Image (cartoon, rainbow, N blue to C red):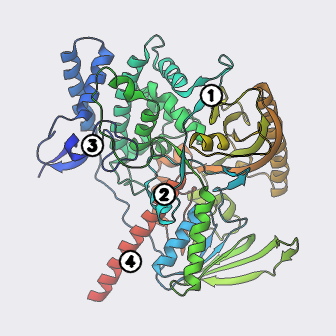
Amino acid sequence: MASCVYVKSEDEGSSGVTDSGSDGEEAFGVEEADGGFFHKPTEWIRDVLFAKAKRAGSNLLFSGMQGVLDIYADLSLLHERADPYPVDSIAGGPRPGDKVVVMGCGAAGAHMAKSLQALGCSVTVLEKDKIGGKACSRKYRDVVHEMGACYLSSDYEKVYQLLQEYEMTGQYNIKCRTMWTEEKKDGMKLKEWFYNEAKLANGTPDWSNASIASEIFMQTYHYISHHRRLLRMYENTEFLPPRPSAEHLRELQMPIAEFLRVHDLQALRPLFELGYTLQGYGFIEEEPLLYGMLWVTPTLINGMIEMLKVRKNLKRRFLRKRPKTSGPPKAITTLVDGFQTLVRKMVARCEEQARDGKSPAFAVHEDTKITGIKRSDTSVEVEYHRGFVSDFGQVIDEPTKTERFDFMVVAAPIPQVLADIDANDEEKSLFATLHESTFITTLVDYKPAKEEETSIDNWPENFDIEKPLAVWAARDSHHVARENGECFELEDHGMGSMVCYQYVHDSLHNDATLSSDDQEQKAMKERADAEKKLRSHLTHFGKTVEHTEQHRFRYFPRHSREAIGQGVLWDIMEMQGKYRTWYVGASMCFEAINAIVEYNDQLLNVWEKQRKEQVEVAAKL
């Protein structure tokens, strides 16, 4: 039976660019179906045709027909793909009753530990610092400031499920964002900056906002077509798509900016600068397309153009009003209680269930240093010791302990763990191409020169690889809370508090020639330079700094473009479990909590299916 492309009609619950996070297929979504090619004309098709007509400026019929041809051409790209190689097998994994050690208690480690306990494993988690990792939430002056993971977007489906499970549904919408430049020292709204940048990137600086909106609309559609073609319409609940063909891998290793140029998608450049580079994921002239597409999904890019009112600009003249849909909030939100609270709740529930005898044993050891790991065909032996300062100021230094486990999960940054693990040649080869950036966040008390009217400040001129430690963004969490109806009675009225973001593209930790002492000295200098630049920057924009509290993260571990072209992420997936070890976290997928949770679930689902098949085969023998 022939496979075809089917577009949902309005009475089936989908229309045009859906509200971000709505149930069902994403905006511009397509799915496999049996029967004819297009079932019904929908608002999705109308949107594309009207955008095409508006871009042409005349001859609606001709433009509409050309738009139909473009749609057919783009949809045909979906079938230009090799035989699928789904991620359906790994080398091994833990079994019910196994004793498992998890290295790291950030979001990846806590979520995997929770899942393994549910599988029937007893779990011990070793964390070098405190529970949370890069989910680092600081409650200060009556509001939570996110120092690490901070936002939810419309495609955080798995995270939203966790939030509901742990009764953490309180969220703040981000409503006001200002872009600051030397030319516009009084700032401009995000939408104004975006349209100006899109016109310049597209080579059409004289176009009206409505004209560039139609162009962005069309280019978004074309981007989604290529996204579907290269990543082959994988399920939203899975992080890693089926292994692409060699030809597609070559395309996925090209820099994001080059892909936009080759496919005439230049008007989308500011979307990637805003949604990718500004989040600390590197510069689009450098980073491989695969990472760009794994983060800028169809759902996310639709949420962004919804936030920027691109479709609204078209709708004023051409498009019918869309029905409202339910689902996660539009665009981006923050958690009222912080991401670290979610991680802590996952751990606390596991400990409670173990105490009550409802689940296997579960323990978390913070402030733990791993001093050695030895693996064999039958077990994993871990040597570690704990040293910390108690709540009463007493220094506790426990004796070194050696413990034997059946299986190990590495949820800590791979570059840090490789020094302690008995890594073999295969592991060293696959992880050798990982490199990191440095992200520094600073909580600042400040006195504004005038009344602040924004939740987030961005300095787009600092999105520059040649400007390490330049201040990219600042978020005033009190202002975010007030915009969402919260009231604060602060003694130091008139003072503001915000989290500022600074970035170094090439982390000093990438230099393998540096000793640990040299790295520490350079890190201290980097911290001092970052604070100096931060104070100078805020003073320049009329803010007087009163207090700072700095956090420094090794951020966004990713593979080289050459390794991406060789399929390294799929090679690692195939190795999972081979040496009584699973590798999870940002080093395996992407520096985002939704990606981490999706990767964990995918790994667990593949192994559970595989394990059940093994049981069924054994039963037949």
Residue 571 lies, in percent from the top left, at 47, 59
| Location of mark 4 (residue) | 611
- Give the mark nearer the N terminus: 2 vs 3: 3
- For the residues labelled 2 and 1, say whether their Cβ atoms are less than 8 Å apart: no
- The residue drawn where x is 65% and y is 29% is 459
Q: Earlier in the sequence, mark 2 or mark 1?
A: 2
Task: Identify residue type, mark 4.
Answer: Arg
Choose top left, top right, bottom left or bottom right for residue 128: bottom right
Q: Which sits earlier in the primary sequence, circle 3 or circle 4?
A: 3
Mark 3, secondary structure of its residue: loop
User: Residue under circle 3?
Assistant: 14
**Whole-number angstrom distance, CA of label 2 to CA of label 1:** 29 Å
Label 1 secondary element: helix
Dot in front, 3 or 1: 3
Report the Cα–Cα distance between label 3 and label 1.
Answer: 35 Å
Q: Residue at x 48, y 82 (%)?
A: 120
